[in-house]
Protein backbone atom coordinates (compact mmCIF):
# COMPACT_ATOMS: atom_id res chain seq x y z
CA UNK A 1 0.00 0.00 0.00
CA UNK A 2 1.38 3.39 -0.94
CA UNK A 3 1.70 6.21 1.56
CA UNK A 4 -0.64 8.34 -0.52
CA UNK A 5 -3.32 5.69 -0.43
CA UNK A 6 -2.98 5.10 3.30
CA UNK A 7 -2.99 8.66 4.57
CA UNK A 8 -6.31 10.21 5.54
CA UNK A 9 -7.31 13.13 3.30
CA UNK A 10 -7.64 16.52 5.04
CA UNK A 11 -11.44 16.43 4.98
CA UNK A 12 -11.41 13.12 6.90
CA UNK A 13 -9.16 14.62 9.58
CA UNK A 14 -11.29 17.72 10.10
CA UNK A 15 -12.88 17.67 13.56
CA UNK A 16 -11.85 14.04 14.19
CA UNK A 17 -11.16 13.93 17.90
CA UNK A 18 -8.52 11.57 19.30
CA UNK A 19 -7.96 10.69 22.97
CA UNK A 20 -4.34 9.86 23.88
CA UNK A 21 -3.98 7.75 27.06
CA UNK A 22 -0.41 7.24 28.29
CA UNK A 23 1.13 7.61 31.75
CA UNK A 24 4.46 8.78 30.27
CA UNK A 25 4.14 12.57 30.05
CA UNK A 26 6.87 12.86 27.44
CA UNK A 27 5.24 10.34 25.09
CA UNK A 28 1.81 11.79 25.78
CA UNK A 29 3.04 15.26 24.83
CA UNK A 30 4.81 14.02 21.68
CA UNK A 31 1.75 12.09 20.52
CA UNK A 32 -0.49 15.09 21.15
CA UNK A 33 1.77 17.49 19.27
CA UNK A 34 2.17 15.17 16.31
CA UNK A 35 -1.54 14.42 15.95
CA UNK A 36 -2.39 18.13 16.29
CA UNK A 37 0.08 18.83 13.48
CA UNK A 38 -1.70 16.17 11.42
CA UNK A 39 -4.93 18.16 11.72
CA UNK A 40 -6.80 16.22 14.39
CA UNK A 41 -8.39 17.49 17.58
CA UNK A 42 -6.59 15.90 20.52
CA UNK A 43 -7.27 15.39 24.23
CA UNK A 44 -4.98 13.52 26.62
CA UNK A 45 -5.23 11.47 29.81
CA UNK A 46 -2.54 10.03 32.10
CA UNK A 47 -4.41 6.87 33.14
CA UNK A 48 -7.62 4.89 32.73
CA UNK A 49 -9.51 6.85 35.40
CA UNK A 50 -8.78 10.19 33.74
CA UNK A 51 -9.61 8.71 30.34
CA UNK A 52 -12.98 7.48 31.60
CA UNK A 53 -13.79 10.94 32.94
CA UNK A 54 -13.06 12.45 29.53
CA UNK A 55 -15.11 9.79 27.77
CA UNK A 56 -18.05 10.66 30.01
CA UNK A 57 -17.99 14.22 28.68
CA UNK A 58 -17.57 13.71 24.95
CA UNK A 59 -17.36 11.17 22.15
CA UNK A 60 -14.01 10.42 20.51
CA UNK A 61 -13.34 9.06 17.04
CA UNK A 62 -10.29 7.11 18.22
CA UNK A 63 -8.47 6.20 21.45
CA UNK A 64 -4.67 5.78 21.35
CA UNK A 65 -4.06 3.62 24.43
CA UNK A 66 -0.82 2.54 26.08
CA UNK A 67 -0.83 -1.05 27.32
CA UNK A 68 1.39 -0.46 30.39
CA UNK A 69 -0.14 1.99 32.86
CA UNK A 70 -0.30 2.19 36.66
CA UNK A 71 -3.57 0.99 38.12
CA UNK A 72 -5.81 -0.35 35.38
CA UNK A 73 -3.77 -1.56 32.40
CA UNK A 74 -4.59 -0.63 28.84
CA UNK A 75 -5.81 -4.15 28.12
CA UNK A 76 -8.12 -4.20 31.15
CA UNK A 77 -9.40 -0.73 30.22
CA UNK A 78 -10.14 -1.88 26.66
CA UNK A 79 -12.04 -4.88 28.04
CA UNK A 80 -14.07 -2.58 30.28
CA UNK A 81 -14.96 -0.27 27.39
CA UNK A 82 -16.21 -3.22 25.36
CA UNK A 83 -18.66 -4.03 28.16
CA UNK A 84 -19.99 -0.45 28.33
CA UNK A 85 -23.09 0.81 26.48
CA UNK A 86 -22.67 2.57 23.14
CA UNK A 87 -20.85 4.61 22.01
CA UNK A 88 -18.04 3.40 24.34
CA UNK A 89 -18.50 -0.22 23.32
CA UNK A 90 -17.61 0.57 19.71
CA UNK A 91 -14.97 3.23 20.37
CA UNK A 92 -12.02 2.50 18.01
CA UNK A 93 -8.78 1.73 19.90
CA UNK A 94 -5.15 1.79 18.73
CA UNK A 95 -3.03 0.11 21.41
CA UNK A 96 0.64 0.97 21.97
CA UNK A 97 2.68 -2.08 22.99
CA UNK A 98 6.34 -2.77 23.75
CA UNK A 99 8.41 -4.02 20.84
CA UNK A 100 8.42 -7.82 20.75
CA UNK A 101 5.64 -8.26 23.33
CA UNK A 102 3.55 -10.70 21.30
CA UNK A 103 1.46 -11.61 24.34
CA UNK A 104 0.31 -8.00 24.81
CA UNK A 105 -0.68 -7.76 21.14
CA UNK A 106 -2.69 -10.99 21.30
CA UNK A 107 -4.40 -10.03 24.58
CA UNK A 108 -5.15 -6.59 23.20
CA UNK A 109 -6.79 -8.01 20.09
CA UNK A 110 -8.76 -10.46 22.24
CA UNK A 111 -9.86 -7.52 24.41
CA UNK A 112 -11.30 -5.85 21.32
CA UNK A 113 -8.72 -3.26 20.23
CA UNK A 114 -8.80 -2.42 16.52
CA UNK A 115 -5.06 -2.34 15.89
CA UNK A 116 -1.73 -2.12 17.71
CA UNK A 117 1.55 -0.28 17.24
CA UNK A 118 4.85 -1.36 18.81
CA UNK A 119 7.01 1.21 20.60
CA UNK A 120 9.28 2.81 19.64
CA UNK A 121 7.56 3.75 16.38
CA UNK A 122 8.02 6.19 13.55
CA UNK A 123 5.57 9.12 13.53
CA UNK A 124 4.65 8.30 9.93
CA UNK A 125 3.65 4.78 10.91
CA UNK A 126 1.44 6.20 13.66
CA UNK A 127 -0.20 8.48 11.09
CA UNK A 128 -0.89 5.55 8.77
CA UNK A 129 -2.30 3.36 11.54
CA UNK A 130 -4.59 6.16 12.74
CA UNK A 131 -5.77 6.90 9.19
CA UNK A 132 -6.44 3.21 8.56
CA UNK A 133 -8.58 2.79 11.66
CA UNK A 134 -10.54 5.97 10.96
CA UNK A 135 -11.27 4.84 7.41
CA UNK A 136 -12.65 1.54 8.69
CA UNK A 137 -14.55 2.76 11.70
CA UNK A 138 -15.19 6.46 11.14
CA UNK A 139 -18.50 7.72 12.46
CA UNK A 140 -20.39 10.66 11.08
CA UNK A 141 -20.22 13.83 13.16
CA UNK A 142 -23.98 13.94 12.81
CA UNK A 143 -26.15 11.08 14.04
CA UNK A 144 -27.84 9.24 11.16
CA UNK A 145 -26.38 11.76 8.68
CA UNK A 146 -28.31 14.68 10.18
CA UNK A 147 -27.50 17.99 8.49
CA UNK A 148 -30.32 20.17 9.84
CA UNK A 149 -33.10 20.26 12.42
CA UNK A 150 -36.53 21.88 12.66
CA UNK A 151 -38.17 23.03 15.87
CA UNK A 152 -41.26 25.23 15.97
CA UNK A 153 -40.86 28.01 13.40
CA UNK A 154 -37.10 27.50 13.21
CA UNK A 155 -34.78 25.70 10.82
CA UNK A 156 -31.13 25.24 11.82
CA UNK A 157 -28.52 24.30 9.22
CA UNK A 158 -25.76 22.46 11.10
CA UNK A 159 -23.21 22.72 8.30
CA UNK A 160 -23.56 26.49 7.87
CA UNK A 161 -24.40 27.25 11.49
CA UNK A 162 -27.35 29.28 10.19
CA UNK A 163 -30.67 29.67 12.00
CA UNK A 164 -33.83 30.66 10.10
CA UNK A 165 -37.24 31.68 11.44
CA UNK A 166 -39.85 31.58 8.68
CA UNK A 167 -37.00 31.93 6.13
CA UNK A 168 -35.64 34.96 7.99
CA UNK A 169 -32.05 34.72 9.20
CA UNK A 170 -31.70 34.93 12.98
CA UNK A 171 -28.30 36.32 13.95
CA UNK A 172 -26.26 34.00 16.16
CA UNK A 173 -22.94 34.69 17.80
CA UNK A 174 -20.19 32.14 17.21
CA UNK A 175 -20.68 30.64 20.67
CA UNK A 176 -24.48 30.50 20.26
CA UNK A 177 -24.03 28.68 16.95
CA UNK A 178 -21.54 26.24 18.52
CA UNK A 179 -23.85 25.43 21.41
CA UNK A 180 -26.94 25.10 19.20
CA UNK A 181 -24.96 22.73 16.98
CA UNK A 182 -23.89 20.60 19.95
CA UNK A 183 -27.46 20.46 21.28
CA UNK A 184 -28.89 19.65 17.83
CA UNK A 185 -26.43 16.82 17.22
CA UNK A 186 -27.72 15.13 20.38
CA UNK A 187 -31.31 16.39 20.29
CA UNK A 188 -33.29 15.04 23.21
CA UNK A 189 -30.18 14.20 25.24
CA UNK A 190 -29.07 16.17 28.29
CA UNK A 191 -25.74 17.94 27.74
CA UNK A 192 -23.90 18.99 30.92
CA UNK A 193 -22.66 22.57 31.25
CA UNK A 194 -19.01 21.49 31.22
CA UNK A 195 -19.51 19.90 27.81
CA UNK A 196 -21.27 22.95 26.39
CA UNK A 197 -18.41 25.07 27.73
CA UNK A 198 -15.90 23.19 25.57
CA UNK A 199 -14.85 24.50 22.20
CA UNK A 200 -12.13 23.86 19.67
CA UNK A 201 -9.43 26.54 19.45
CA UNK A 202 -6.53 25.97 17.05
CA UNK A 203 -7.09 22.23 17.18
CA UNK A 204 -7.20 22.06 20.98
CA UNK A 205 -10.20 21.67 23.25
CA UNK A 206 -10.59 24.62 25.62
CA UNK A 207 -13.25 25.57 28.13
CA UNK A 208 -15.11 28.85 27.89
CA UNK A 209 -16.18 28.47 31.55
CA UNK A 210 -19.33 26.84 32.83
CA UNK A 211 -20.70 30.08 34.27
CA UNK A 212 -20.67 31.67 30.83
CA UNK A 213 -22.80 28.82 29.47
CA UNK A 214 -25.84 29.95 31.46
CA UNK A 215 -25.51 33.49 30.10
CA UNK A 216 -25.12 32.27 26.51
CA UNK A 217 -28.03 29.83 26.84
CA UNK A 218 -30.22 32.66 28.16
CA UNK A 219 -29.34 34.78 25.12
CA UNK A 220 -30.01 31.89 22.76
CA UNK A 221 -33.30 31.14 24.47
CA UNK A 222 -34.47 34.73 23.94
CA UNK A 223 -34.05 34.15 20.21
CA UNK A 224 -35.88 30.84 19.90
CA UNK A 225 -38.49 30.74 22.66
CA UNK A 226 -41.79 32.63 22.83
CA UNK A 227 -42.05 32.07 26.58
CA UNK A 228 -38.63 32.16 28.26
CA UNK A 229 -40.25 31.24 31.58
CA UNK A 230 -41.68 28.04 30.11
CA UNK A 231 -39.38 27.09 27.24
CA UNK A 232 -40.67 24.47 24.83
CA UNK A 233 -37.48 23.65 22.95
CA UNK A 234 -34.38 24.68 24.93
CA UNK A 235 -34.96 23.26 28.38
CA UNK A 236 -32.98 23.46 31.61
CA UNK A 237 -32.60 20.17 33.45
CA UNK A 238 -31.84 21.28 36.98
CA UNK A 239 -28.49 20.09 38.26
CA UNK A 240 -27.68 18.29 35.02
CA UNK A 241 -27.52 20.68 32.07
CA UNK A 242 -29.58 21.58 28.99
CA UNK A 243 -31.63 19.72 26.40
CA UNK A 244 -32.97 20.68 22.96
CA UNK A 245 -36.24 19.16 21.74
CA UNK A 246 -36.65 19.22 17.98
CA UNK A 247 -39.62 18.38 15.76
CA UNK A 248 -37.63 16.95 12.86
CA UNK A 249 -34.08 15.82 12.11
CA UNK A 250 -33.18 16.19 8.44
CA UNK A 251 -30.64 13.94 6.75
CA UNK A 252 -28.51 14.39 3.66
CA UNK A 253 -30.94 12.53 1.43
CA UNK A 254 -33.77 14.85 2.52
CA UNK A 255 -31.83 18.08 2.54
CA UNK A 256 -32.56 19.27 -1.00
CA UNK A 257 -36.27 18.94 -0.54
CA UNK A 258 -36.45 20.20 3.04
CA UNK A 259 -34.11 23.17 3.19
CA UNK A 260 -35.94 26.51 2.95
Image: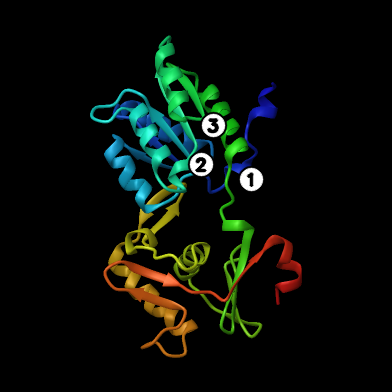
User: In which quarter of the view is residue 98 placed?
Assistant: top left
Please report contact status of discs 2 and 3: CB closer than 8 Å, yes or no.
yes
Q: Write down the residue under mark 3.
A: 130
Find residue 46 and name its label. Answer: none
Residue at the left extreme of this rendering: 71
Query: Which numbered disc, 1 or 3, marks the residue that appears first in the sequence?
Result: 1
Q: Nearer the viewer, residue 245 or 112?
A: 112
State the residue at coordinates (48%, 23%): 116
State the residue at coordinates (55%, 27%): 129
Q: Where is residue 212 in the image (x, y as percent from the top left)?
A: 32, 69
**216 lies above or below 116:** below
Q: Residues within 10 Å of mark 3 (few under 14, many from 20)?
A: many
**161 lies above or below 11:** below
Question: Which tag is nearer the camera, tag 2 or tag 3?
Answer: 3
- Classify mark 1: helix, strand or loop: helix
Q: Write down the residue under mark 2.
A: 40
Please report contact status of discs 2 and 1: CB closer than 8 Å, yes or no.
no
State the CA–CA distance, disc 1 to disc 3: 15 Å
- Classify mark 2: helix, strand or loop: loop
User: In which quarter of the view is residue 133 placed?
Assistant: top right
- Figure quadrant of the N terminus: top right
Q: How crowded is mark 2: few (under 14 residues within 10 Å), some or many (20 or more)?
A: many
Q: Write down the residue under mark 1.
A: 11
Residue 41 appears in the rendering: no
Q: Where is residue 250 in the image (x, y as percent from the top left)?
A: 65, 67
Amino acid sequence: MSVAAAAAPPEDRARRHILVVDDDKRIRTLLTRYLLAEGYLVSAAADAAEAMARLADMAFDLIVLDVMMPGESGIDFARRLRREPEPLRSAPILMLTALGETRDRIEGLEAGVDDYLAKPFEPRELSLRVAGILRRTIRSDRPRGVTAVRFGAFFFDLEKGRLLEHNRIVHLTTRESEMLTALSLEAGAILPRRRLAQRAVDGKIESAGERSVDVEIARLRRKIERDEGGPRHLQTIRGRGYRLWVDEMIGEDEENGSTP
